[in-house]
């Protein structure tokens, strides 16, 4: 049984160890350490402790490295059988002895709690208890430590607080440790930043802004805190202020992939694709592949592809080289960026969509705007003829938009993004097509039913569609544009019975509430008797391919007004 379990755990652990080893070889000890901590939280393996020691040693933390090496050599893995190989054990011993000799540490390091004095307690020992799942012991150690009783040593509290943040059960104690670090004599800007991150992750944006502000006040050049401020404003829907703050962060670190990514995406939200792509292209030109060492480095080309496609024909020549670049990523990098599900999904979708012609010539044609979620890209830049007039489909993308987001009073990012799309329409635009609802049917409707917010799928669909219809009416009135609504794209997998039901009910609701000439209803054309998308229209398992354009053109000509420009 032990052998079977060991084999299973090793299989799960190997990819993480490979990712961490690659990051460590590229001197990215922070990323390698984060991977190791995640692994240690679920699998007890001395190789993880050994690698954590190497991370700490590279980071310049000899005491933490010492504790990790000791843990690697003394860890009880009898329950899993995951022992340290002889060569690795020797490496851990050599590194341990070298640290002891270099820094004058005592070779014996205790492992208990009750009989140890305060000065023996280090952040590394507490962190090891957390990694081993002994959280109560970690809390006891921290509360018994000398820096807690003397309210001193902010760096101690910072490191402990950062470690405890990764365990939800220790969140309150993490907050206490980080607050204590801030309040110690001399303060601790990094702890203020960590507190900002905690509040941001909890959706408490105003509180996060307060702590990020404290960090910037104490350390004006702290780019991560400036970026944190920008993230808060972005998620509150204040995109203009978000761009101001992202620009401040990128002035401090112009080639940081995270800041380039975030600012480019903020430009996307306000429909300034040229600014986004100028920034992205400049960054790409200045960053050789040899310097791409973190997940964020490899994430930027994914966003770059989406921006180039949505940004229009001017940028389309860049798409194929970017797709080739992504295809050539090392396997470990591809595995890592696939964890960025939204961005990988866009890349996968567009890589399949552009196998056909990206955009035929648009000269002599007026735009017809598609506003909404990622499904607007299925028809982007294609030709249609509207009452004898040549037109092309121009996308106005709102990434991740749900109909439910559009409820009155909500200030979610996608709502601000939607309004920016409407504000960017040329003067005189009389009619446009709105595309939304697929994500609601994929996850929102059923999720709400499962959480008992509604008694049935029909009740959830009724409420969501009510929000959607009210939003469409309000947007149409505010921007003086007649909106037509595209029917919701069906799922592709017959196993997704809940999605099939939600999509069918939602489209039925749109038919009874809108009908012609508002609804552009192609659902019956693209849906099989099983309720899934017909293979002829399937692009990537979620979106339609270009084959649906004749159906859309049919509905446009049937429902658009005679005087539509």
Image: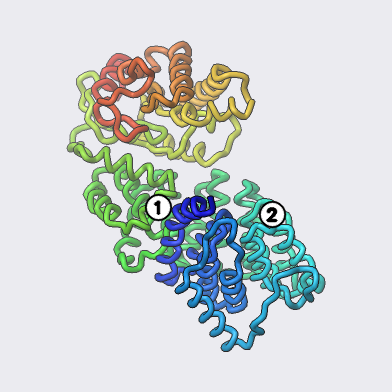
Q: In which image quadrant can residue 70 be found?
A: bottom right
Please tell me which of labels 1 and 2 falls first in the chain.
2
User: Quick one: SS at disc 1?
Assistant: helix
Q: Is residue 297 above or below residue 60?
A: above
Q: Nearer the viewer, residue 107 or 564?
A: 107
At horizontal 39% and vertical 21% (from top left) the residue drawn is 487
At horizontal 23% and vertical 49% (from top left) the residue drawn is 320
In the image, taking residue 377 as reference, residue 504 lies left or right, namely right
Location of the C terminus by quadrant is top left
Residues at badges 1 and 2 in contact (C-beta under 8 Å)? no
Q: In which image quadrant can residue 464 be found?
A: top right
Estimate the x, y position of residue 336 in percent, counting from the top left: 41, 54
Q: Mark 2: few, some, or many residues within 10 Å (few <14, many ≥20)?
A: some
Q: In which image quadrant can residue 389 be found?
A: top left
Label disc, if present, on residue 171 of the rendered structure: 2
At horizontal 48% and vertical 51% (from top left) the residue drawn is 8
Estimate the x, y position of residue 251 in percent, counting from the top left: 46, 66
Q: Nearer the viewer, residue 114 or 488?
A: 114
Cα–Cα gap, marks 1 and 2: 28 Å
Query: Among all residues in the image, which is located at the extreme right?
Result: 149
Q: Nearer the viewer, residue 117 or 433?
A: 117
Q: Examine the rendering and report whether any part of residue 255 can be seen.
A: no
Estimate the x, y position of residue 129 in percent, counting from the top left: 66, 63
Q: Examine the rendering and report whether any part of residue 123 can be seen.
A: yes
Q: Is residue 507 above or below residue 5?
A: above
Q: Is residue 283 above or below residue 411?
A: below
Label disc, if present, on residue 382 of the rendered structure: none
Q: Nearer the viewer, residue 237 or 426?
A: 237
Residue position marked by numbered label 1 in the rendering: 337
In the image, taking residue 453 as reference, residue 48 lies left or right, namely left
User: Quick one: SS at disc 2?
Assistant: helix
């Amino acid at each position: 049984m032990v052998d079977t379990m060991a084999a299973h755990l090793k299989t799960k652990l190997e990819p993480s160890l490979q990712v961490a080893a690659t990051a460590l070889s590229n001197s990215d000890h922070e990323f390698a350490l984060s991977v190791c901590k995640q692994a240690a939280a679920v699998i007890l393996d001395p190789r993880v402790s050994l690698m954590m020691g190497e991370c700490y040693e590279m980071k310049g933390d000899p005491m933490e490295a010492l504790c990790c090496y000791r843990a690697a050599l003394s860890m009880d893995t009898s329950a899993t059988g995951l022992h340290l190989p002889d060569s690795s054990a020797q490496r851990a011993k050599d590194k341990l002895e070298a640290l002891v000799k270099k820094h004058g540490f005592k070779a014996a390091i205790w492992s208990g709690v009750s009989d140890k004095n305060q000065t023996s307690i280090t952040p590394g020992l507490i962190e090891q208890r957390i990694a081993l799942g002994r959280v109560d012991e970690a809390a006891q150690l921290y509360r018994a430590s000398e820096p807690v009783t003397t309210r001193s040593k902010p760096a101690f509290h910072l490191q402990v607080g950062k470690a405890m943040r990764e365990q939800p059960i220790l969140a309150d104690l993490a907050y206490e440790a980080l607050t204590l670090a801030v309040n110690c004599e001399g303060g601790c800007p990094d702890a203020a930043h960590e507190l900002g991150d905690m509040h941001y992750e909890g959706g408490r944006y105003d509180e996060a802004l307060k702590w990020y502000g404290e960090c910037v006040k104490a350390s004006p050049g702290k780019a991560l805190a400036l970026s944190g401020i920008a993230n808060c404003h972005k998620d509150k829907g204040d995109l203009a202020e978000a761009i101001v703050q992202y620009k401040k962060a990128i002035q401090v670190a112009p080639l940081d992939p995270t800041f380039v990514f975030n600012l480019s995406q903020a430009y996307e939200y306000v429909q300034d694709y040229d600014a986004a792509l100028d920034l992205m292209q400049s960054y790409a030109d200045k960053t050789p592949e040899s310097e791409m060492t973190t997940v964020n480095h490899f994430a930027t080309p994914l966003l770059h592809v989406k921006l180039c496609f949505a940004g229009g024909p001017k940028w389309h020549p860049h798409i194929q080289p970017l797709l080739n670049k992504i295809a050539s990523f090392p396997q470990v990098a591809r595995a890592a960026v696939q964890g960025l599900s939204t961005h990988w999904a866009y890349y996968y979708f567009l890589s399949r969509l552009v196998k056909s012609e990206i955009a035929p010539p648009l000269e002599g044609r007026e735009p017809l705007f598609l506003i909404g979620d990622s499904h607007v890209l299925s028809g982007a830049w294609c030709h249609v003829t509207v009452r004898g007039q040549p037109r092309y489909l121009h996308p106005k993308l709102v990434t991740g938009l749900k109909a439910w987001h559009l409820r009155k009073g909500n200030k979610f990012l996608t709502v601000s993004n939607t309004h920016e799309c409407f504000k960017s329409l040329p003067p005189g635009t009389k009619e446009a097509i709105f595309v939304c609802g697929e994500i609601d049917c994929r996850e929102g409707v059923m999720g709400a039913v499962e959480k008992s917010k509604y008694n049935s799928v029909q009740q959830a669909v009724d409420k969501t569609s009510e929000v959607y219809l009210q939003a469409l009416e309000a947007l149409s009135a505010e921007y003086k544009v007649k909106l037509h609504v595209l029917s919701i794209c069906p799922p592709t997998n017959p196993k997704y019975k809940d999605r099939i039901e939600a999509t069918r009910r939602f489209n039925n609701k749109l038919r009874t509430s809108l009908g012609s000439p508002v609804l552009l209803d192609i659902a019956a054309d693209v849906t099989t008797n099983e309720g899934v998308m017909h293979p002829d229209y399937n692009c990537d398992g979620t979106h339609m391919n270009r084959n649906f354009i004749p159906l859309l053109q049919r509905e446009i000509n049937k429902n658009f007004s005679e005087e539509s420009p």
